[in-house]
Amino acid sequence: MIQTTGMDSYVSALRQHLGPISLADREEILKEISSHIRDSLEQGGSTLESVLDRLGSPEGLASQYRDGLLIRRASHSISPLLLLRASLRLASKGVSGMVVFFAAMFGYLIGGGLVLSAFAKCVLPAHTGVWVSNGKIVSSGTLFPIPQFPAHEIAGWWYVPAALAAGSLLILLTSFVIRTALRISHLVQARISTQPE
């Protein structure tokens, strides 16, 4: 009876810390943890305290489940915001996660900047594009005025489709790289969690 009370209080605390995840996911997690605790106790040789110690605190376990759900959901998504959230969460777990997060930021910022500059070319054609002076590029895709010394624009209105294409491809490539990294991370975590202690 004491063990059932202790298990119920642990599962109840876990329910509170799981936070804003779907009801179906929450109930599946709680069912899985309850089943794991019962199975461990029925096999004998383990006390409730030792089983709960192996699981860790309800806060820590809930955080692991939330991270896993976010990473799994993002690894099948094309939403840049969801991918960035998941890569930020992955960045908190180690150096490889930080590399993925900074690559995501770089790819999305450059890609988004190119797409925005293509639209800016339509509104401010004299201030956006690629200019060359004396064989050197002096301004590229910027909203700042062209240099005062003689320069000529080399892309003209072709800048719009070129910047749109390059920016869109960079955003897609960044999304693909993040999704791949998240899937690899999810597989590694699954492999680590299934190894015997």
Image (cartoon, rainbow, N blue to C red):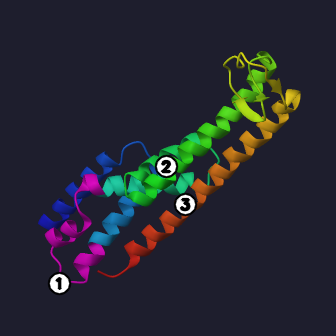
**Residue under numbered circle 1:** 45
* Amino acid bearing label 3: Ala
Locate residue 164 relative to residue 75 in the image: left or right: right
* Amino acid bearing label 1: Gly
> Residue drawn at (84%, 35%), measured in percent from left and top?
161
Q: Position of residue 35 (x, y in %)?
A: 34, 69
> Residue drawn at (17%, 70%), measured in percent from left and top?
48
> Residue drawn at (37%, 51%), measured in percent from left and top?
92
Q: Is residue 59 magenta?
A: yes
Q: Quadrant of residue 128?
A: top right
* Amino acid bearing label 2: Phe
Q: Position of residue 44 (x, y in %)?
A: 20, 83
Mark identifier at residue 101: 2
CA neighbours of label 1 inside 10 A, class few (<14), some (14 to 19), many (20+): few
Locate residue 171 relative to residue 60 in the image: left or right: right
Q: Is residue 74 magenta?
A: no
Q: What secondary structure is found at the residue carrying circle 1?
A: loop
What is the span of residues highlighted in magenta in the rendered image?
Answer: 38-60
Identify whether 155 is placed above or below 91.
Answer: above
Q: What secondary structure is found at the residue carrying circle 3?
A: helix
Q: Quadrant of residue 138?
A: top right
**Going by the picture, which residue comes out furthest to the front?**
134
CA neighbours of label 3 inside 10 A, class few (<14), some (14 to 19), many (20+): some
